Amino acid sequence: MMQPEAIPLAEPDLRGNEAIYLQRCLESGWISSIGPFVSDFEKRLAEYVGVSHALTTGNGTVALHLALAALRIGPGDEVIVPDLTFAATANAVLYCGATPVMVDVSPDDWNLDPAAVAAAITPRTKAILPVHLYGHPCRLDEILELAGAAGLYVVEDAAESLGSRYRGRPSGSHGHVSCFSFYGNKLITTGEGGACLTADPALHERMSFLRDHGMNKKKRYWHDEVGFNYRITSLQAAIGLAQMERIGELLAAKRRNAELYRRGLAGLGLEMSGELPGLSSSFWMFNLLLPAEVDRAALMAALDARGIATRCVFYPLHQMPPYQRFVRPGQQFPVADRLSARGLSLPSATTLRADQIEKVCAALRGLLGEPSWATAKLEPITTS
């Protein structure tokens, strides 16, 4: 029996100058963390996000740790994080010896609930770490106002939101520092990789110092503090630079995917990824909420049998063993629990064809009880 065509959840899109730039990098001999590709990639990132400084890192998780460490967050400090996020958000706080304070998220954007943030601030709070989950920006105006009134740092976890915009400004340009990820499933990739971006030159300098083992910039091999080796390689930066040349095209593909899904799944009564007024999502992952009566595991298995990859929405932090000790007495997370239990991420690669998305939509319609839609076709759309 012929196997169905595999439709991936995500995959890197390497159809630009990646191979050419890698070859140039190899020919130059500068393949470690020094060389023009690193500085050029950092410059392009800073220009795109609209800040003055970008510092590349080995991955998005160490970017978060580096940012928090540079802000001197440590034991005794609290950092407010959303309960619904990838574990790296809380882990970076724990790496610093600080305490992650988990709060519930809003049902309309799946991001930090500003009211819950306000209620969680204590004299020990040092920072707020909003996550632009699945590419949709947080309510930054409210979060920044709360942070300003309490004298707190704002560290944007923008790992999933490169290309998103909040009231006209790029994601990652609002907080004291923002952190991005360039893992293989992100909008742009360097294989593994990340970056810390800031408009503060002193903060940038400190992150650069800590990233390179805490080594004195003027006296090589003299270490003023215990630092980290969190650098990216020139090989990775070469790929990243080629990816940045096509970022508009890649972002348009994500938005096309979202529009095709919204059209193809209309009428099923499903809550689907969207955008709040004035905000623009990168649609890193396209998600939907299944009806409560649907067996998600069985649905995912049926889709997998048809060659369609899916995944569950992140588990809330408070449900997992490493973080349960940080749940405060009587604290509940009803929104995060509901979203996690019913959320489903659909194939979201920039390489997807329209007919593949049609197949996903037809399969969902059939499995959710409308087999007459099994041969439905989506009208082609264009993107600018």
Image: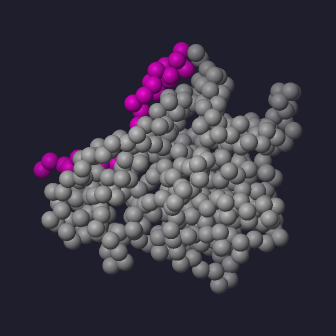
**Picture quadrant where residue 92 is located:** bottom right
Q: Is residue 235 left or right of residue 353?
A: right
Kindly identify the residue that appears in the image at 52 percent across and 33 percent down. Answer: 244
Q: Residue furthest left?
A: 1
- Identify which residue is drawn at 52% across, 36% down: 190
In this picture, residue 255 sits left or right of residue 230: left
Main SS of residues in magenta: loop
Nearest the viewer among 270 and 97 is 270
Question: Residue 101's x, y, as percent?
Answer: 69, 69
Q: Position of residue 189 (x, y in %)?
A: 50, 39
- Measured as percent of width and height from the top left, residue 2 is found at 15, 48
Q: Does the segment drawn in magenta span residue 273?
A: no
Q: Which of the image's four quarters has the C terminus?
A: top left
Residue stretch rendered in magenta on the structure: 1-27
Residue that protrudes farthest toward the top in the picture = 27
Q: Nearer the viewer, residue 1 or 342?
A: 342
Which colour scheme appears in the figure? one colour
Q: Is residue 67 above or below residue 224?
A: below
| Residue 16 in view (yes/no) | yes
Q: Is residue 5 left or right of residue 229?
A: left
Judge whether 275 appears above or below 32 on screen.
below
Looking at the image, the residue that sits furthest to the bottom is: 330
Magenta stretch contains residue 8: yes
How many numbered callouts?
A: 0
* Quadrant assignment, res 51: top right
**Residue at (59%, 60%) from the top-left corner?**
138
Residue 347 in sight from this viewpoint: no
Residue at image position (41%, 56%) is: 286
x and y percent of residue 145 in the render?
73, 62
- Asked where in the image residue 199 lies, by quadrant, the reply is top right
